[in-house]
Image: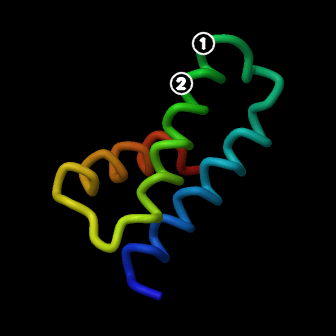
């Protein structure tokens, strides 16, 4: 498993923990935003390598969803 794949799995787990912890506030637009971002990260798992743009976006998501 590559280092990027491990980081993507870690990001997905972090996003799921965030959603579970804040599920009472997790209504409407915030849910739709989280859903789009989570689908984006899941879609990146199929790629063999990530571009610089993808890495920057993942770093933004990491900072937003860290516990």
Up-down: is 45 above or below 65?
A: below
Counting from the top left corner in percent of width and height, residue 13 is at 64, 59
Examine the image and state in which quarter residue 32 appears.
Answer: top right
Between 67 and 6, the one lying in front of the other is: 6
Residue drawn at (37%, 74%) of the image: 4
Drawn side of residue 59 relative to residue 51, left or right: right
Based on the displayed image, in which of its 4 quarters is residue 30 positioned? top right
Q: Could you tell whether 8 is left or right of 23 in the image?
A: left
The residue that appears at 58% across and 56% down in the rendered structure is 12
Residue 62, placed above or below residue 45: above
Measured as percent of width and height from the top left, residue 33 is found at: 53, 24
Q: How is the image coloured?
A: rainbow
Left or right, 67 with reference to 53: right
- Give the number of callouts: 2
Find disc 1 in the rendering and name its residue: 29
Q: Which residue is mark 2?
A: 33
Question: Could you tell me residue 53's position as x and y percent?
Answer: 19, 49
Q: Are marks 2 and 1 in contact (CB under 8 Å)?
A: yes
Please report the residue visible at 61 percent of the width from the left and 55 percent of the height from the top. Answer: 14
Foreground residue among 39 and 57: 39
How would you rate the neighbour count of disc 2 (Cα within 10 Å): few for under 14, some for 14-19, many for 20 or more?
few
Q: Secondary structure at mark 2?
A: helix
Is residue 33 positioned above or below 55 on the image?
Answer: above
Q: Residue furthest left?
A: 52
Residue 50, quarter of picture? bottom left
């Amino acid at each position: 498993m590559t280092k990027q794949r491990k980081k993507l799995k870690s990001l997905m787990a972090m996003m799921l923990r965030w959603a579970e912890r804040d599920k009472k506030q997790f209504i409407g637009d915030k849910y739709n935003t989280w859903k789009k971002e989570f689908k984006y990260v899941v879609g990146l798992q199929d790629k063999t390598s990530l571009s610089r743009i993808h890495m920057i976006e993942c770093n933004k998501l990491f900072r937003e969803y860290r516990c």
